[in-house]
Amino acid sequence: MNRLRSTLTDPLVLATLSILVLLAAGEALSPGFARGDQIVRLLVVSAILGLVAAGQSLVVIGGREGIDLSVGASISLGAVLAGNVMAGQDGSIFLAVLVAGGATFLIGLINGLGVTMLRIPPLVMTLGMTGVVQGALIVISRGIPSGNAAPALMAFVNRPLVFGLPGILILWALVGVLMWVLLRRTRLGYAIYAIGSNERAAELTGLPVRAIRTLLYGLSGLFAGLTGVIVIGYTGNSFVSVGDQYVLPSVIAVVIGGISLAGGQGNYFGAMLGAIALTLLTSVLTTLQLEFWGRQLIFGAVLLMLMLLYGRAGRLRA
Amino acid sequence: MTPARTNPAMAALRNRVWLVTLSALIALFVINWILQPNLVTPNVLKSNLTVFLPVVLVAIGQSYVILGGDIDLSVGSIVALVNVVTVSVIAALGGGVPAIFAGIGAGILTGVACGLVNGLLIAGLRFQAIVTTFATGIIFGGLALRILPTAGLPVPAEYWRTYGGAVLGLPVVLWVLILALVIIAIIARRPFIKHLSAVGGLRQAAFQSGLPVARIRILAYVLAGLFAAFASLCLTGETASGDPLMGRLLALSSISAVVLGGAALAGGSGSAFGAVLGALVLGMIGNVIFFARFPFEYQTLIQGLITLLALAGGVLVARR
């Protein structure tokens, strides 16, 4: 019984079960919901969230209350920069990725320096950075939608590439593999878990704790910037607040995937499942044809239920 | 955490971070006065206070939650829910003066109830605070949209005229601020505040020394709900109508205000009074940038940079 209980409350099992239940519910509510092409469409949306969640996972696993609330602003910046650099030309896609990724990597590094060198709490640092980046976006674009996606980028995100899957899904799978290799097969990966679970011990073993943590925030910015490029490929154009909607879902996807906000545990595979589950939930609620408020109530209630199942802190002991 | 370097001046400063915030506020006020010569006239001061008051009130509530080592991202939605409950109750009861009082009472009860729900989930069931208050915020916001789907439903003139008017020669908004300061002064003298600070600083030790940790944290969330309700009633007096999307940005600006006021997000330090100063500093930064006549498209960027620098400075001063 205890074994059954611990299996059922394993985040990975739970996220997978939620995905299956949501698929079944969607199919029951609206036949065709779980059809192949529909699932591919849902996975594309999940992939966008999943890419941001990759950076968010790293920052959260790295510990010291790690969280990156500036990913939304970085996505917007990535999308706007990429859109303006590409200006609808296929030949400029590589340059666009470079500019968007470079700028947001830099922003992430600044976040990391603030958190490690000045020891500003991550929530405050990344929140403050959000205001700065949003201000910069207004200067860059003067508040109006600007830039266009190149046709090849839009095809990469929306059209089948191999086995009927769009390129973005292949990219996401690749990111999943790379994250697994990074976290489980490299010294850096072990160092990330070490600084996340016991910073003091990690420091005493000679790990460059500050450099590693700064790098994690840089990578989070980089993932957000690349997500911005994908977002403009998905929607065709960009506006200055296009990334805002991903900030808290990226944190939730990480939590649903079993990565503790306390740091030092969990893996990206869980966050990928979390991103899919969250996207499915939103989609099922849309098919319910409930009014907006009804969807909000159910969404909030489901999050609380997930918290009840495995997002709880230990009991204080005398 | 780091052993205190025994510099008495710095040590004295650490416990009075609000002094630094106060100095910043005075400096900003002077700059604002230079840029806007009519600042120190009753009307301009009053309209400034009217704009700042909601953030000040929400930040006071947030400061208790943060002192206890938690956080509340749902305060913005509580403001919206209290607003629609208040205007709906007033409208349903016919809009007379008794209806206004009933509406205000219902709004305050709503705020307290929301805080109680947050507290029970987080301190009672030990849910994670960030995700939980994000989720309850979505629920409170959904309920607000259920009660009032679109902005509208004006409040009776008695409500907003009183709020915009004066009592005993002083504007009502100033009375609200004074009342809020009196409340936080009373709370500051209760043992509750020491207990809350212990709970936020060393939860395990607080528990072992016999403090009712859960009850103390729940009370902090109830206070956050209560002050969010006050803020909402003020916003309602300012806008004179219902708006289910009211207060969207209040959660984040209240957290910034609390940090500017010298609180550590890890809990255990900071004060409601500091949060008041922090909220005023945030507001004055906006004022100064507006009156300095920077090109319009640069204003958000400059505001963002100054706020980030102020936050970093607040954190640094609080630690040394």
Image: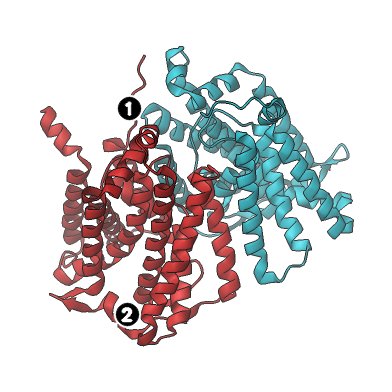
Chain colours: A red, B cyan
Q: Tag 1's secondary structure?
A: loop
Q: Residue at x 45, y 31 (%)?
A: B119
Identify the element where label 2 is drawn. Answer: helix
Along the line of sight, the residue nearer the viewer: A95 or A317 = A95
Residue sitting nearer the eye, B154 or B258: B258
Mark seen at residue A202: none
Find residue A22 and report its horizontal and vertical position in percent: 21, 54
Quadrant of image for the N terminus of chain A: top left
The chain letter for the residue carrying disc 2 is: A
Residue B109 locus on image (x, y percent): 55, 34
Residue in the image at 40% along x and 73% along y: A98
* Residue that carries the numbered disc 1 in the rendered image: A314
Going from N to C along the chain, the mark reached first, 2 or 1, is: 2
Residue A71's place in the image compared with A151, above or below, is: above
Considering only vertical position in the picture, is A77 above or below A92? above
Q: Which residue is drawn at 53% across and 33% down?
A: B65
Q: Where is residue B95 in the image (x, y as percent from the top left)?
A: 65, 47
Residue that mark 2 sits on: A154
Do the residues indicated by labels 2 and 1 lie within the same chain of the protein? yes
